[in-house]
Amino acid sequence: KAGVTQTPRYLIKTRGQQVTLSCSPISGHRSVSWYQQTPGQGLQFLFEYFSETQRNKGNFPGRFSGRQFSNSRSEMNVSTLELGDSALYLCASREPADTQYFGPGTRLTVL
Amino acid sequence: TQLLEQSPQFLSIQEGENLTVYCNSSSVFSSLQWYRQEPGEGPVLLVTVVTGGEVKKLKRLTFQFGDARKDSSLHITAAQPGDTGLYLCAGDGLSNTGKLIFGQGTTLQVKP
């Protein structure tokens, strides 16, 4: 099976802009979770989607949002970008109650 | 709030030495995963431990889950330069919500 894919791999934006990141899960996986990784905070959970519904949300401001489509592909959106949003954004997919498998990530740089 | 304390944060050793990385919490986890991550890439799963007291071996790597499912360790025997990387432990809460709690990570450097 193909692994989790994320696009784009690299992105440069300026403050105030918005960005949309995409994640395609492993075939058959219906759950997609998103994480933010920074040198200072490590890996932090953003949210999880299952069957197009957000099931769980981390402690991030409302500027961070996401959605999931009927084919289980997921997108996350960050509006009004801040310098502190620069990070590696990772998505992971899984079968219910199983281990999470991560994609390669999208490196977002906010200037 | 569930937390995972991972130690040490940095480890620099010579090829052939042994090492142990620890992951501790006051919370119980339904399972615990160990991942390895290369710079600029996503974490790659090494192992999942589920049962208290479980020991799993992956070549020179030995993983242990504590009896109470609150802690875990990763032991590497005869480390090699190819083992260099960031090692992360991650716990899955009892409600299995898809939210992994990550430790801070251990950056391992193995010098030839």
Image (spheres, grey):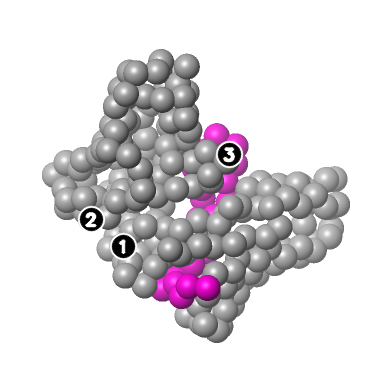
- Look at mark 3 in the image and give the residue it sits on: A39
Q: Distance between the residues labelled 3 and 2?
A: 27 Å
Q: Which residue is drawn at 48% across and 73% down?
A: B27
Q: Which residue is drawn at 41% across and 25% down?
A: A82
Instruction: Give neighbour class at mark 3: few <14, some 14-19, many 20+ (Cα, 10 Å).
Output: few
Q: Distance between the residues labelled 1 and 3?
A: 25 Å
Question: Does the image show residue B55?
Answer: yes
Question: Which subunit holds the residue at mark 2?
Answer: A
Determine the image quadrant of residue A80.
top left
- Look at mark 1 in the image and give the residue it sits on: B97
Q: Is mark 3 on a helix, strand or loop?
A: loop
Q: Distance between the residues labelled 2 and 1?
A: 7 Å
Q: Residue A55 carries which label?
A: 2
Q: Is mark 2 on a helix, strand or loop?
A: strand
**Are the residues flagged by discs 3 and 2 from a single subunit?**
yes
Question: Which subunit holds the residue at mark 1?
Answer: B
**Residue B6 spot, x, y in % from top left:** 62, 60
Question: Which subunit holds the residue at mark 3?
Answer: A
Q: Which residue is drawn at 34% across and 18% down?
A: A16
